[in-house]
Image: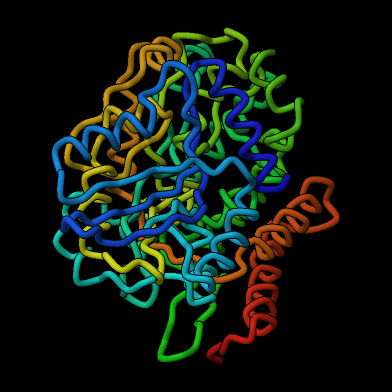
Amino acid sequence: MSFNKRLVACAAAVAALSMGLAGCGSSANDSSGSSDGVVNITYMHRLPDSEGMTLVNDIVAKWNKEHPDIQVKATKFDGKASDMIKKLETDVKSGEAPDLAQVGYAELPEVFTKGMLQDVTQYAEQYKDHFASGPYSLTQVDGKSYGLPQDTGPLVYFYNKAEFAKLGIDSVPQSADEFIDAAKKAAASGKYIMSYQPDEAGNMISGLAGASGGWYKVKGDAWVVDTETDGSKAVADFYQQLLDAKAATTNPRWDPSFDASIKDGSLIGTVAAAWEAPLFVTSSGGTGSGDWQVAQLGDWFGNAGKTGPDGGSAVAVLKSSKHPKEAMEFLDWFNTQVPDLVSQGLVPAATTEDAETPSEWGEFFGGQDIMKEFKDANNNMGDFTYMPGFSAVVAKMNETAAKATDGSGKVEDIFSDAQTTSVDTLKNLGLSVAK
């Protein structure tokens, strides 16, 4: 499914818990210094701001009270992420864009390529230690920073510990061979400890492969593309073995059949993004509540204990901002308001304060402090850079991944198609690609 459908599905489930999932933000407002010396900053976001959350305007009000010389006005953008990008592009050209806008990590390189962002490396450096290094790297292009990370989607492993015990699986297997053997054993009993999600290949599988080595980098004035890394080959081999043995479910993530597999107790383990925790609570319909746990990824994909990104967003400083220093000062403060951001349903990228696990999540996950697991995953995230136009790569990967479910294709084809599509997309955007 499309990113927008992923977002709608996530938001709908999270809303049931009075929680939310972040997207990206946009709009426009004048930002200038007033005659009395006050610097005015504008910030556009797409946070849920639903009932029971600490509203963005209330968070900002605390800043404004404590910082009379830097006043911030926040505005919520209710449109689609793609509409936000279009509006931002128009507003930057007209000089009416906000100082700050929330931008998905996968979208940031595209916004950068369109000349919409401001290099704020000199200001970002002083705040670098406030955030996990993996998410921080996602706010950079060619080593230069264009904002700060807000929330993350590190990939982790969700599993039903009680069901594992019934199958005689004492703990989450740590090697690929051990995991595949356990998956075959579970499948023989009608249980599945892994899912293969064709509609999430572009997001999840790219993150898994990228955990052991990024796909994209900038060298000089050209993009270097390598989607067929050793990590990619390890991911392909892992999933192909599971598919060949019929030891993984193949229900698309955003199809009702995926939720049904959790409710009927057949799916008892899967890789998932951290932001999916509240979705599992809703999707389960109560099945297995209190038995589920979160674990770090094993070394199943040649990732040496590292994980990769799936979702999350940064807040970037737009090119037209006249006050990047003050904008970054506020941004660092806002993105480290951990309890307030958690109330919005986010997994914060900040390391300045431990996030507390919401009670609804804790109950489902057996009292486990899953926010600690997500923090550990953040700190274990490999460096990964997205390329401009990555959405086209995601679409092609998803299309190819679907063929592996019926045997008309192989998992390894996902990565070869990603290579071709990446190069073609960059060239179609008029960008140089290194050979």
* Residue sitting nearer the eye, 174 or 428: 428
Percent across and percent down for residue 356 are: 27, 23
In-image side of 400 versus 238 (left or right): right
In the figure, residue 75 lies in which quadrant?
top left
Q: Looking at the image, which residue is at 44% across and 55% down?
A: 29
Q: Residue 223, can we see it?
A: yes
The one nearer the camera, 209 or 76, is: 76
Tell me which colouring the rendered structure shows: rainbow
Above or below, 352 relative to 52: below
Q: Quadrant of the N terminus?
A: top right
Residue 350, given in percent of the width and then of the height, sits at: 25, 43
Can residue 229 be seen in this snapshot?
no
Residue depicted at x 36% and y 18%: 358
Horizontally, residue 81 falls left or right of residue 330, namely right
**Could you tell whether 217 is left or right of 90 in the image?**
left
Q: At x 50% / y 16%, what residue is drawn?
A: 17
- Residue closest to the eye, 293 or 30: 30
Viewer-proximal residue among 196 and 23: 23
